[in-house]
């Protein structure tokens, strides 16, 4: 009985550790994608002197439902990926990622949500001294819950 109880306790600890490692890995990969996008956008801004024309993710009006935000995120994501590709800034950037993260049209976070480009701060999304930033909806896949969202401005930008 003691041996079985000990095995159950060890198995419980191993499952908990595996969940923690999986969550840390997902966070790390998404932060790396955000950092890469931030770097590519910094090069774009330096090259062209402005950010690309991308559909706004969220306007100044009343906050829309998450389903509307998801569609807006997809349009936003496709537009900034298209702009960065046309500028030649994504060549080789995501070659090491699986198609689940980057499929030549969209870039997604570890939980399958489109990553969003924000051309300016918005109090419902995130606050930063930077003019523009990228962000991920995080593990809960909800863009308006800021607790688990991941932001590119949390990462140092690596200059090329």
Image (cartoon, rainbow, N blue to C red):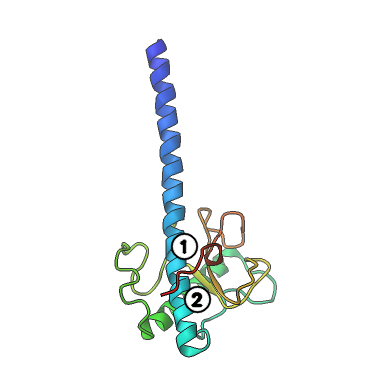
Rendered residue at 43%/36% (across/down): 17
Q: Is residue 45 left or right of residue 22?
A: right
Please tell me which of labels 1 and 2 falls first in the chain: 2
**x, y (%) of residue 4?**
38, 15
Viewer-nearest residue: 62 or 145? 145
Placement of 116 over or under 22, stated as above or below: below
Residue at 41%, 68% in the rendered image: 107
Residue 76 numbered tag: 2
Relative placement, left or right, of 136 versus 129 is left
Crowd tier of the residue under label 2, counting other residues whose Cα lies within 10 Å: few below 14, some 14–19, many 20 or above: many
- According to the picture, the residue beneath numbered tag 1 turns out to be 113
Looking at the rendered structure, the secondary structure element under dot 1 is loop
Tag 1 and tag 2, C-beta contact below 8 Å: no
Q: Quadrant of the C terminus?
A: bottom left
Residue 103, how many percent across, how many down?
Answer: 33, 69
Name the residue rendered at 44%, 28% in the picture: 12
Figure quadrant of residue 158: bottom left
Which secondary structure lies at badge 2?
Answer: helix
Pointer 1 local density, CA inside 10 Å: few below 14, some 14–19, many at least 20: many
Whole-percent x, y for residue 55 in the image: 53, 81
């Amino acid at each position: 009985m003691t041996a079985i109880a000990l095995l159950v306790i060890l198995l419980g600890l191993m499952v908990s550790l595996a969940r923690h490692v999986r969550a840390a890995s997902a966070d790390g990969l998404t932060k790396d994608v955000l950092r890469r996008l931030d770097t590519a956008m910094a090069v774009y801004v330096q090259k062209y002197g402005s950010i690309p024309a991308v559909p706004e993710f969220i306007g100044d009006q009343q906050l829309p439902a998450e389903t509307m935000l998801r569609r807006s995120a997809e349009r936003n994501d496709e537009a900034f990926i298209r702009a960065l590709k046309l500028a030649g800034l994504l060549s080789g950037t995501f070659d090491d990622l699986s198609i689940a993260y980057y499929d030549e049209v969209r870039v997604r976070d570890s939980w399958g949500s489109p990553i969003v480009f924000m051309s300016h701060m918005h109090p419902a999304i995130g606050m930063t001294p930077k003019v523009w930033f990228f962000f991920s909806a995080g593990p809960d896949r909800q863009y308006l819950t800021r607790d688990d969202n991941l932001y590119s401005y949390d990462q140092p930008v690596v200059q090329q």
